């Protein structure tokens, strides 16, 4: 029997045991328990020791009990490791993060690429402090600070340039105010503090660049300095070889720099489920390893030398890109796999994955709860535990069947179906021989079979990954990537070709630009087709399918279905199909199940969402109808890529179980009120858009264009309008008329929303003139949403006397440059005996109006 036939028959053997994988899962379960169920460390240690002795006792008497106790001991060890690991947080006794001016002496530990805007200079770098001078004493303190430098840029700096000397190891001295990073205090909000802490950054500050003093000397690692220089040299080379659109994609694809990719194109990649091609992940590491292995085989390099060479290449790539944990996880898994391969353990891929997971969890236990860690290992598990067994049972049989196609003896070692398939190929080749000769037809047919099998394998693996990722994509990113499969069918092959062509172009261009033209041109076309296809697919309405946070029963069912699909994939065909069917059903449930609003029934709820220096207010009627007034936003002059509507407001709404809004309202077209509303229209498809009758501007026109694309009808609200919104009664006080001469704040939509004997008054940014007129109409309300973030131009005493609220809430940004809320306004509210809340201190603030009284509630409590 030939070796190929033996391999085919060996697939009928049961799968090998995977003790390291089960051990990693047990350790992960224990770490999760240690996160949510704190117990004294000695309890976990005692439990682990006890279980070890029990496992030793049962190992020869009851093997299954010995395995169970050993896994339980690993779980205890996981909880113990997590709780005894020293915290990386800075010493809480450091009292400099209070907004008081200090002078920092520091050195750059992580630099950022300059802005492409020639009229403005903003650079954000991470520095490590050497000394902190608060005017009274100078302390030697080592801690990480994310520093933002701003001002007019003195000259043009090419992408990837380093003309401003803010390179790694550069020593600086500058005056700043240090603050601890602040999260948006809404349920489900992104944990910005933990994100920065993972990079060793615990404080933030800013300064004008022309006030920064460059100090002599170098502080840091010479190896890191060399790495950053090579990194930026590659970045400059990319922008030399390719035009800006293609160069931006090449930056992201090759070295993980997505700073030059526009937010709209990034959103298209996210909508289509192809964002992974723009980040350095396991896909890129795999492509690099496969290409290197193929190239070495062409030169007939032995397995041992080829594996070592691939390992060194991947390690060098991981060091050069320096994009953090994802690439190192992929690299570690590849190392484990290649080592197992060198030791002739080709069937122990899952064991290798388990070993890699255990190592990473031991080094950084807290990474377990992060989306990146979970998605990295889940992707590999789905491929190896579900995809590979399916391929081995289907397409791979035909791929192996075309080997040694001329050998009639090999036919006898194959199942009848595969033997007949080989006979059919020979028969077709014989008919073609009269036209093309005897050698070429059989070669073409076998090559065609292999290409077809490869395409089917790719389609099958992509399908399984997208189905398996339905739950985590919905939980972490609130996306049902309905076009992910066709998008990846187009994107992944283009990515493979583009990445290889880019690497070839970069390498050859260092020798000759003329010789590099072919790979550069090939990469350009691939990158253009990649960006164009993703943009085209991202325009479809179905690509914007967003889902709220799945219910607990959906999460549990999805996890069980995924585990069952993995366990049954190598069993009998009927069981394997049943496991895959369960996975498909739960994926459809995740994407299509109706949402359930989380909140109290029978009351009017008003929540002032923490959006920083802006406004966004959610109202929910007693019957569950939803109205969002404003959606926050960031002014253009702040040069931020953050979309408050997408990143903050939408996240909060999804956390509340909201998938659609009944209506949205914009009080006036200022960026801090209207900026996030376009994302809200795309994500929640409201039935109505309410606007005041004030003058228009560019941002409002963009919003109206988006409303037309989403088929959202626009309703104009004016002073004097009264209408019912389900059980709620709404009365509009402003704007009265439209005038281009008035300030936009005076055109704010001002209205009361009442339920029973209780009501809330929402002012937008209305100022003194409007408040004086409204006060004459005696707009009594129990709850006041304070105007203009607590500016001194609003909330005048006569207005407060007319409204006579019991509660007030101020939507305001922490440490804002305007000094909001003003002390005079807080004093007016205190004099009127109004109990006042503010989002910068309290986070999202919710009020429940039951028709008789108002009850406040804080999200952080």
Image: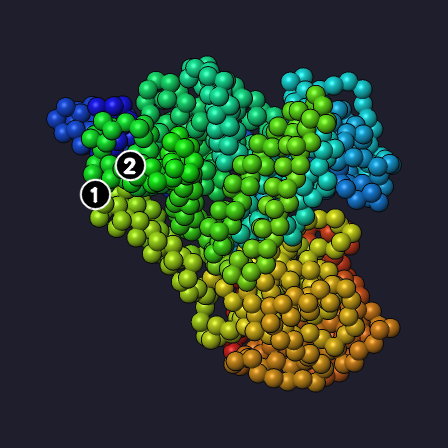
First in sequence, mark 2 or 1: give its number: 2
Residue 14 lies in what quarter of the image? top left
The quadrant of the rendering that contains the N terminus is top left
- Return the residue at label 2: 422
- Residue drawn at (77%, 29%), measured in percent from left and top? 162
Circle 2 Cα neighbour tier, 10 Å, few/some/many (<14 / 14–19 / ≥20): many
In the image shown, does 371 or 179 lie closer to the viewer?
A: 371
Above or below, 737 relative to 423: below
- Residue drawn at (67%, 36%), measured in percent from left and top? 521
Residue 803 lies in what quarter of the image? bottom right
Residue 256 placement (x, y as % from top left)? 61, 35
Residue 828 placement (x, y as % from top left)? 73, 66
Q: Report the residue that reaches farthest toward the front.
A: 434
The secondary structure type at the circle numbered 2 is: helix
Q: How many marks?
A: 2
- Residue drawn at (56%, 73%), measured in percent from left and top? 687
In the image shown, does 73 or 390 lie closer to the viewer?
A: 390
- Return the residue at label 1: 572
Q: In the rendered view, does 757 fall on the left or right side of 667?
A: left
Above or below, 658 relative to 377: below
- Residue drawn at (64%, 55%), measured in percent from left and top? 644
Residue 810 placement (x, y as % from top left)? 67, 62
């Amino acid at each position: 029997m030939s070796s190929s036939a033996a391999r085919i028959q060996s697939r009928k053997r049961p799968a090998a045991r995977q003790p390291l994988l089960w051990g990693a899962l047990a350790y992960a379960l224990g770490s999760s328990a240690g996160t949510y169920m704190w117990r004294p460390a000695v309890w976990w240690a005692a439990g682990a020791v006890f279980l070890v002795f029990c496992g030793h006792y049962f190992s020869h008497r009851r093997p299954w009990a010995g395995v169970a106790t050993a896994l339980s001991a690993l779980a205890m060890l996981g909880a113990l490791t997590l709780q005894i690991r020293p915290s990386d947080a800075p010493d809480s006794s450091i009292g400099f993060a209070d907004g008081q001016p200090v002078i920092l002496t520091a050195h750059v530990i992580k630099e950022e690429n300059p802005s492409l805007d020639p009229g403005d200079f903003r650079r954000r770098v991470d520095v490590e402090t050497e000394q902190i001078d608060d005017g009274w004493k100078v302390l030697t303190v080592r801690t990480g600070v994310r520093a933002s430098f701003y001002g007019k840029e003195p000259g043009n700096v090419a992408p990837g340039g380093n003309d401003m000397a803010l390179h790694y190891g550069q020593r600086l001295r500058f005056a700043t105010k240090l603050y601890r990073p602040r999260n948006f205090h809404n349920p489900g909000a992104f944990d910005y503090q933990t994100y920065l802490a993972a990079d060793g950054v615990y404080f933030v500050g800013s300064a004008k660049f022309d006030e920064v003093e460059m100090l002599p000397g170098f502080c840091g690692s010479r190896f890191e300095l060399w790495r950053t220089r090579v990194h930026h040299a590659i970045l400059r080379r990319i922008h030399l070889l390719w035009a800006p659109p293609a160069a931006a994609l090449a930056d992201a694809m090759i070295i993980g720099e997505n700073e030059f990719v526009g937010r709209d194109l990034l959103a298209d990649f996210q909508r289509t489920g192809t964002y992974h091609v723009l980040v350095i992940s396991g896909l890129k590491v795999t492509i690099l390893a496969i290409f290197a292995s193929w190239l070495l085989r062409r030169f007939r390099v032995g397995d041992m030398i080829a594996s070592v060479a691939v390992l060194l290449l991947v390690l060098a790539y991981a060091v050069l890109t320096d994009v953090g944990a994802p690439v190192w996880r992929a690299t570690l898994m590849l190392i484990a796999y290649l080592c197992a391969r060198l030791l002739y353990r080709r069937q122990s891929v899952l064991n290798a994955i388990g070993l890699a997971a255990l190592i990473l969890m031991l080094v950084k236990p807290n990474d377990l709860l992060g989306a990146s860690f979970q998605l990295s290992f889940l992707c590999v598990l789905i491929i190896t535990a579900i995809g590979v067994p399916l391929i081995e049972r289907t397409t791979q049989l035909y791929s192996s069947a075309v080997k040694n196609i001329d050998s009639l003896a090999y036919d006898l070692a194959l199942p009848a179906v595969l033997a007949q398939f080989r006979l059919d190929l020979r028969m077709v080749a014989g008919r073609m021989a009269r036209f093309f000769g005897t050698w070429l037809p059989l070669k073409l047919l076998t090559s065609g079979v292999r290409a077809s099998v490869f395409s089917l394998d790719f389609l099958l693996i992509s399908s399984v990954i997208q189905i398996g990722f339905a739950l985590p994509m919905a939980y972490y990113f609130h996306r049902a990537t309905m076009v992910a499969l066709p998008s990846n069918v187009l994107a992944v092959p283009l990515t493979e070709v583009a990445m290889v062509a880019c690497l070839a172009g970069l390498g050859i261009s260092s020798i000759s630009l003329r010789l590099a033209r072919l790979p550069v041109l090939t990469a350009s076309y691939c990158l253009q087709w990649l960006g164009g296809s993703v943009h085209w697919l991202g325009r479809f309405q179905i690509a914007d399918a967003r889902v709220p946070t799945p219910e607990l029963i959906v999460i549990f069912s999805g996890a069980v279905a995924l585990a069952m699909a993995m366990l049954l994939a190598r069993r009998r065909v009927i069981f394997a199909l049943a496991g895959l069917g369960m996975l498909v059903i739960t994926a459809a449930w995740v994407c299509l199940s109706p949402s359930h609003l989380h909140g109290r029934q029978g009351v009017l709820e008003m929540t002032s969402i923490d959006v920083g220096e802006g406004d966004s207010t959610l109202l929910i009627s007693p019957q569950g109808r939803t109205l969002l007034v404003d959606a926050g936003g960031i002014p253009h002059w702040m040069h931020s890529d953050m979309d408050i509507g997408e990143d903050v407001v939408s996240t909060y709404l999804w956390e509340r179980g909201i998938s659609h809004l009944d209506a949205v309202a914009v009080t006036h077209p200022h960026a801090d009120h209207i900026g996030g509303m376009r994302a809200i229209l795309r994500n929640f498809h409201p039935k109505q858009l309410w606007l005041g009758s004030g003058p228009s501007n560019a941002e409002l026109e963009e919003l109206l264009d988006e409303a037309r694309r989403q088929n959202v009808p626009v309703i104009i609200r004016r002073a004097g309008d009264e209408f019912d919104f389900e059980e709620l009664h709404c009365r509009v006080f402003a704007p009265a008329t439209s005038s281009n001469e008035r300030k936009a704040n005076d055109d704010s939509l001002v209205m009361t929303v009442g339920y029973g004997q209780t009501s809330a008054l929402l002012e937008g940014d209305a100022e003194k003139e409007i408040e004086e007129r409204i006060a004459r109409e005696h707009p009594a309300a129990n709850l006041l949403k304070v105007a203009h973030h607590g500016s001194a131009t609003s909330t005048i005493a006569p207005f407060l006397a007319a409204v006579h609220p019991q509660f007030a809430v101020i939507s305001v940004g922490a440490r804002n440059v305007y000094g909001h809320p003003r002390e005079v306004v807080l004093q007016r509210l205190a004099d009127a005996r109004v109990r006042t809340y503010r989002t910068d201190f309290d986070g999202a603030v919710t009020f429940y109006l039951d028709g008789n009284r108002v009850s406040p509630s804080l999200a952080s409590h």
